[in-house]
Amino acid sequence: MSDSQPQQPSPFPRNPAGGAGRGPGDGSAPRPASGSARDPLAGPPPEASGLLLSGARLTDGRTVDVRLSGGRIQAVGTAGSLPAPALARVDLRGYLLLPAPAEPHAHGDTALTADGEGPVSYTPDEVQRRATEAALLQLGHGATALRSHIRIGDVHGLGPMEAALQARRSLRGLTDLTAVAVPRLLTGMAGADGVAMLRDAVKMGASVIGGCPDLDPDPTGFLEAVLDMAAEHGCPVDLHTDGDDPARLARLAAMAGGLRPGVTIGPCGGLSRLPLEAATRAADQLAAAGVRVTCLPQGDCAALERRGLRTAPVRLLRAAGVRVAAGSGALRDAGNPVGRGDPLEAAYLLASQGGLRAPEAYQTVSTAAREVMGLPEVRVEAGFPAELLAVRGDRIAGVLSLAYSRIVIHRGRVVARTSAVREYCDSAVAVALDLPRQGRTEPGP
């Protein structure tokens, strides 16, 4: 894969994590609907600018056809009610159609470094390669928008930010990548360079200002510097914090309350270690200030330079009125050497261990994640953006349990597809139980 030109999806794309797109799973590849010889992954034909999704199941139980055009949902109707012979079509029988997830907390500059030997390279070419590959991996999981925290300063200067912005340009049309500038220090003598570099990063194209106040000798001064610059440039703020200091959270809420377009903090695992009364009071303060929280159910990210953080108390925060999104955090780096970067796994963990119902858990990686990132709302209704994920299954709970086969739609175009095939051997028990068999009828790629 070229550093500046990511590999375009083929009709049967290989799994970026390895393998040829098949494995133990729950379904088979979607079949092109009759009347369409063109693979939708190749993009719309010159004479057509739309796509018809046929036979999709919605979360309310309806089976519908969905017509896409111009990057938006043009129409939703009962199955067979939207004839469109000129459009490319995708048969979604057996698939649940959902608003696509978004990834609100990634680290593209450090992703995929856990298995390397020796020091991690931060040359622009290496950072761009990692950021691009990580974004494509997460796109394959369904995330059509990505917010990536990029460290700036120290010996690497603005090189990683330049590389991330180049990755963003090369991925245009496949996924939307937003870069968060993450300085290390912003106070004292050492922080003067950080302030100047942060200002340069925003001028370069970083559209979100981040950082970790917990690691600065003067956390309040760090926060003041970030909020002042965000107000000056009209940027949102997305900060790393453990959240284990109630007084610090109270100051953050008091200082951040009036900032637009808003402040997000995470992963806030330390809130789970506070006494219930203190955690509840902190949650109420964050809610009153409109501060949003991004939790990381899959584990740590390396930015806080510590391990073993628990997931933020999602139910407590939601009960207080805090808008909570879920991110993936580390993707096979020092923070989590086996991190998958899969938003559906984050939702699964919130449903299986975090006390949320499956639909609520999915909302944390879709609706809430998009809101935290300042993106337009997505519903499977006419007029909304065509940012969609089709997963083999008929209910969200089943999808979170066995989310193997997926079709990802970005700006009205199929941009990624993962097909899983499950087969059982020819045994007496398989025959007696009439187990499903979904083998290929022709050789795969």
Image: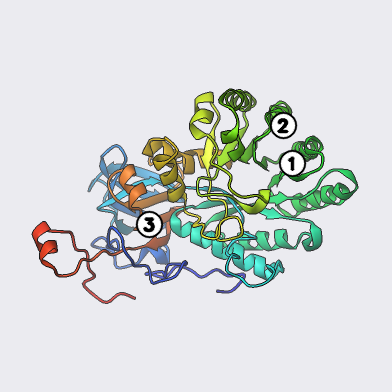
Residue 120 showing in the rendered view: yes
Crowding around mark 1 (Cα neighbors within 10 Å: few <14, some 14 to 19, many 20+) is: many
Cα gap from disc 1 to disc 3, whole angstroms: 39 Å
Q: Could you tell me which residue is drawn at 71 percent across and 66 percent down?
A: 122
Looking at the picture, which amino acid does disc 1 mark?
Answer: Pro
Left/right of residue 25 with respect to residue 172 in the rendered view: left
Tag 2 and tag 1, C-beta contact below 8 Å: yes
Q: Is residue 258 above or below residue 336?
A: above
Dot 2 falls on a residue whose secondary structure is: helix
**184 or 101, nearer to the observer:** 184
Left/right of residue 244 with respect to residue 196 in the rendered view: left
Give the residue pinned by disc 2: 248
Give the residue pinned by disc 3: 407
1 vs 3, front mark: 1
Q: Of callouts 2 and 1, which one flags the residue occurring earlier in the amino acid sequence?
A: 1
In terms of image quadrants, where is residue 284?
A: top right
Q: Could you tell me which residue is drawn at 39 percent across and 59 percent down?
A: 48
